[in-house]
Amino acid sequence: MVATVLLLVLLAVESVAAGGAIVFLSMAFHSCAAPGNSCDVGLGSTVVTVGPVLAGLVFVATLLGCTLRLVRRRLAWPIALVGIAAQIVVFSAALLLVDSAVQHGF
């Protein structure tokens, strides 16, 4: 139980950091005004809007999964580890999508 609680606290910190970092990815679109650069603003704004929501959903789903397993007196720390990995995937996908939305010219 102690490991689960510690991992959930780590997940909470990671969720806030990932959500905030995804919002800050919108700063990549400031380079769109430079000559030769092109941007897909629709994709970028969708990622910046949906990304923090997905980070929150991963946290809530992991919290519920761990709570249900702890109530049934089963190991829950593997679920917390999966949630941590899922947060990394959400942030990495958001980073890749924003990077693909901004095309730097020469």
Image: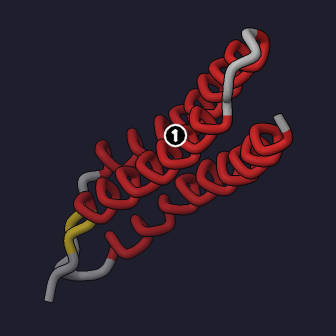
Circle 1 Cα neighbour tier, 10 Å, few/some/many (<14 / 14–19 / ≥20): few
Is residue 85 left or right of 17 when viewed as pictured?
left
Residue at image point 40% right, 65% down: 29
Colour mode of the rendering? secondary structure
Residue 100's spot in the image, x, y percent? 23, 61
Location of the C terminus by quadrant is: bottom left
Residue 96's spot in the image, x, y percent? 31, 59
Residue 37's spot in the image, x, y percent? 22, 75
Residue 10's spot in the image, x, y percent? 74, 51
Q: Residue furthest top?
A: 72
State the residue in front, 99 or 36: 99
Residue 2 location, quadrant: top right
Question: The disc labelled 1 sits on which kind of residue?
Answer: Val
Residue at image point 60% right, 23% down: 61
Does dot 1 land on a helix, a strand or a loop? helix
Q: Which residue is mark 1?
A: 82
Is residue 67 left or right of 43 when viewed as pictured?
right
State the residue in front, 64 or 49: 64
